């Protein structure tokens, strides 16, 4: 419940005390003036400084982002170039290996052909030597047999003539 005092009942709410009102307005304007001159510029300066700091950080972040993007592009290009280079190196190594294998095959075939020719020459030489040895032995035996048959001895010159004739006859028979 509300109790209204008798002394308060007679107060007019519209009645203003001018001294209090003027004092309040003057004090408000005085503090507002001091705040506007001394405090407000510092607040504005602090806000401007903070604004500049934020703008600077945003600009540095943009620069850093651009540099990172550039570095990424450069790294990707370097990686791409390395892949191309490695592919080329592998292709060159394969080509070199194939060339080396071809050269080795050619050298081996040439050496094999040379060995075959040398073997054929040695075989031909051994054959000719064997034929001469056999011919000489046959001539000696023939001469010995003929000498015994004739009971006479044949001289070295006669024997050489018989050997030459026999060799010529053998050569003639081989070529036919």
Image (cartoon, rainbow, N blue to C red):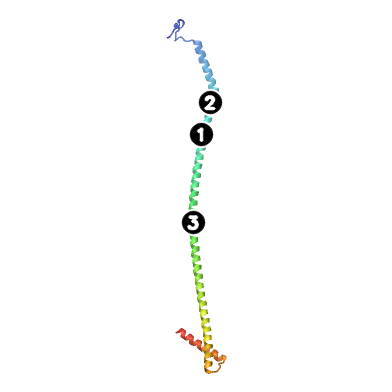
- In the rendered image, the residue lying farthest to the right is 156
Q: Where the C terminus falls, by quadrant?
A: bottom left
Q: Which circle's residue, 1 or 3, is located before the other in the chain?
A: 1
**Residue that carries the numbered disc 1 in the rendered image:** 55
Alpha-carbon neighbours of circle 2 within 10 Å: few (<14), some, or many (≥20)? Answer: few
Label 1, secondary structure: give it.
helix
Q: Position of residue 41 (x, y in %)?
A: 54, 25
Q: Which circle's residue, 2 or 1, is located before the other in the chain?
A: 2
- Label for residue 154? none
**Residue that carries the numbered disc 3 in the rendered image:** 90
**Are the residues flagged by discs 2 and 1 in contact, CB closer than 8 Å?**
no
**Residue that carries the numbered disc 2 in the rendered image:** 43
Residue located at (53% from left, 21% from top): 35
| Residue toward you, 103 or 20 | 103
Label 3, secondary structure: give it.
helix
**Are the residues flagged by discs 1 and 3 in contact, CB closer than 8 Å?**
no
Alpha-carbon neighbours of circle 3 within 10 Å: few (<14), some, or many (≥20)? Answer: few
| Residue toward you, 109 or 130 | 130
| Residue toward you, 122 or 136 | 136
């Amino acid at each position: 419940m509300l109790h209204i005092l008798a002394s308060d009942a007679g107060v007019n709410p519209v009645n203003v005390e001018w001294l209090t009102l003027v004092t309040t307005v003057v004090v408000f304007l005085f503090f507002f003036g001091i705040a506007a001159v001394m405090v407000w510029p510092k607040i504005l300066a602090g806000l401007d400084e903070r604004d500049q700091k934020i703008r600077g950080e945003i600009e540095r972040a943009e620069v850093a982002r651009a540099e990172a993007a550039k570095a990424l592009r450069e790294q990707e290009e370097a990686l791409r170039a390395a892949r191309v280079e490695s592919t080329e190196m592998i292709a060159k190594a394969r080509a070199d290996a194939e060339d080396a294998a071809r050269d080795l095959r050619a050298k081996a075939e040439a050496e094999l052909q040379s060995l075959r020719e040398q073997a054929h020459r040695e075989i031909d030489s051994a054959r000719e030597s064997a034929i001469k040895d056999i011919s000489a032995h046959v001539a000696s035996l023939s001469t010995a047999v003929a000498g015994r048959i004739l009971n006479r001895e044949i001289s070295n010159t006669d024997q050489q003539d018989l050997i030459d004739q026999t060799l010529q006859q053998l050569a003639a028979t081989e070529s036919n």
